Amino acid sequence: MADHIRAASLLAIAFAAPAWADIVTVKSPDGRNAISIDSDKFSYTVSRDGKRIIEPSPLGLNLDIGALAAGARLRGHAETTVKDTYEIVLGKARSAPDHYQQSDIAFAANGKAPQFHLLVRAYDNGVAFRYAVPEQAGLSAFKVMNEATQFNFARDYDCWGANMGRFDTSFEAEYDLTKASKIRNFHNFIAPLVCKTGAGSTTFAIAESDVKDYPGFYLSGRGDAGLGVMVTLPPRFDNSRDYRFRKTVSASVQLKGQGFQTPWRVVMLGDAPGDLAASSLIPTLATPSQIQDTSWIKPAKTSWDWWNDWAVNVPNAGVNTATYKAFIDFSKEMKLDDILIDEGWSVGSDVEPNPQADVTRAKPAMDMPDLLRYARSQGVGVWLWVQWQQLDNQMDAAFAQYEDWGIKGVKVDFMNRNDQEMVDWYHKVLSKAAAHHLMVDLHGAYPPNGLNRTWPNYITQEGVLGAENNKWSARITATHNVTLPFTRMILGPMDYTPGGFHNATPSTFVQRNHEPMVMTTRGQAVAMYVVYDSPFQMVSDSPAAYKGADGKWADGAEFIQAVPTSWDETRIVAGDIGEYIVSARRKGEAWYIGAMTNESGRTLKVPLSFLGKGAYHAHLLQDGDDASRLSASDSKVTATQTLTLKLAPSGGAVAVITP
């Protein structure tokens, strides 16, 4: 059953239901979550197990022709129940449930404001609502000036959020712990804002899904000293060649032929932070796949040049044919699928727009035909990096050229915006890439909002403070690493770029550009491949880093060779924000366990109740006697047993459990 209703068809549905109540309540299928709409005050509340989490909070859109706000007359509401399942092309599971209760609430025109609807849904793992304006006589277009949506808190929650403080941003920051009372109206938090209610371990997150023809949002303090946040929209850019934002219009809307819907405003809900990490609610709310044949979209692991600073053992290593042939050889030996050719390969390649650039031609030092022939002969795929404005100037020609070359995918970088025009550009680049069978990894990207379901060739993205920062800062701490799964990663895949094998302790860590260090153990390095979601996963260090002095594989290298990057099932076994995490993922009949901790070492008892009947073989890698060593062990286990994992400070462990 379709999980989206076109805005143009909503009016007829709403007329079928009488308006006999001012309060419309929608409950989740399991009855635990409820969202109630006060149609008179045009506000809403959210509760879980009867306990209020979001207090009465304003709804509304401010348009140039009027406001969708309190005073609008309720015309009726129609209820729908959906129980469905959809297949996931790549990700944390093979499929996800789409089970919800919905109310479509229709409101009459008010003055100059148009007729509109509020779509409200309740799932077992959260609630969501969106505004919709159907086609109607005398109205073909309008402008959204701002949004009046707020999320008012019941108490002074502990929250984790990334405050960017501006609209032009790479969306990379720590998710710091803050009290709700400390959030100010000049803050610009990106999604998600994750909060604990104080009632047991109950946790919720504010996010959005299905963003199209509209800007992405930020969350700011209410500005009235009250607890909670309000939606802040970036203005339209209206000039794609510099960073001057216009300060009046957030979205320009055309109604003809389709009506209009805002993104879903989402409150994810769980009994513990791990429930959010395991959730697929954000892609579930998004428009289903627009790609009919997805058979060419494949998960992969890749070697990468930029992070290790082109550290291969060839003369004059750099952006040249010999260097990338060496990376191809390494990928083949390491059993990796691809190589990623980063910045510098094309004529005029740069992080800036450079109107003289040509992303269809390689620099003279790069013999692209020879390089691609060699990659094919070795069974290794090739990805290419491009700066977004350089690509935009030549998108059709470039994608046709890349398809002709046999390129598997593109890494597009430095968009650093989420205004309406940039959101539209994401849809354009993903749709055109799909037409040429190109997978996409976006960097300088806004937070995931389900777009990887709509365009499943969008297999990973940045918008995360990841491993690249080890080159120039000490920000990538173990605490940060175990905060990400419960914050940024609950929205969708993240290209953190793991694989750093120059492991150090915080006291011995040194910032350096060439073959950077990481201030976490080898155990944590390999655990990231289980804990972090990314169907396209970097193996970021130099080829030499994955070998010992004796020429044999270094500790953990063979695990990276074998670990999948897309899964049939995911469970978060244990963990807490900024403390530790234990993830269990299944691929076929094999289970992979990944555990990571902050700067505190700990011993974890992992119940194996998720296993089937019978005996299994467990191969365990955990922290050794120094940061770069692993200790291996093997045992027989059953579903009635627990697995003991000993994690060093800033450490980790993995286990592979097979029948």
Image (cartoon, rainbow, N blue to C red):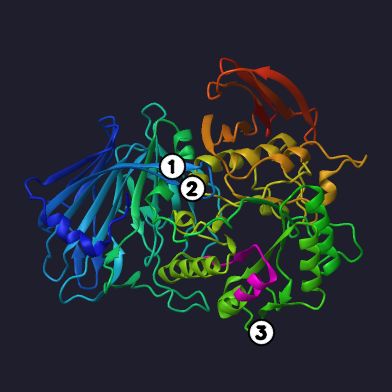
Residue 184 visible in the picture: no
Amino acid on which disc 1 is placed: Ala
Residue at 83%, 68% in the rendered image: 321
Residue at 51%, 41% in the rendered image: 93
Q: Which residue is mark 1?
A: 96
Instruction: Kindly give the residue lying farthest to the bottom in the view shown.
Output: 356
* Front residue of 588 and 254: 588
Q: Which residues are magenta?
A: 400-416
Which quarter of the rendering shows the C terminus?
top right
Amino acid on which disc 3 is placed: Gln
**Picture disc at residue 356:** 3
Residue at 73%, 71% in the rendered image: 344
Label whose residue precedes the other's in the sequence (1 or 2): 2
Q: Do the residues under discs 1 and 2 have CB atoms within 8 angstroms?
A: yes
Answer with the quarter of the image where residue 621 lies: top right
User: How many C-alpha atoms fall within 10 Å of the one at disc 1: few (<14), some, or many (≥20)?
Assistant: some
Q: Position of residue 123 (x, y in %)?
A: 32, 40
Q: Position of residue 469 (x, y in %)?
A: 67, 53
- The question of residue 402 being in magenta is answered with yes
Q: Which residue is mark 2?
A: 88
* Front residue of 537 and 542: 537
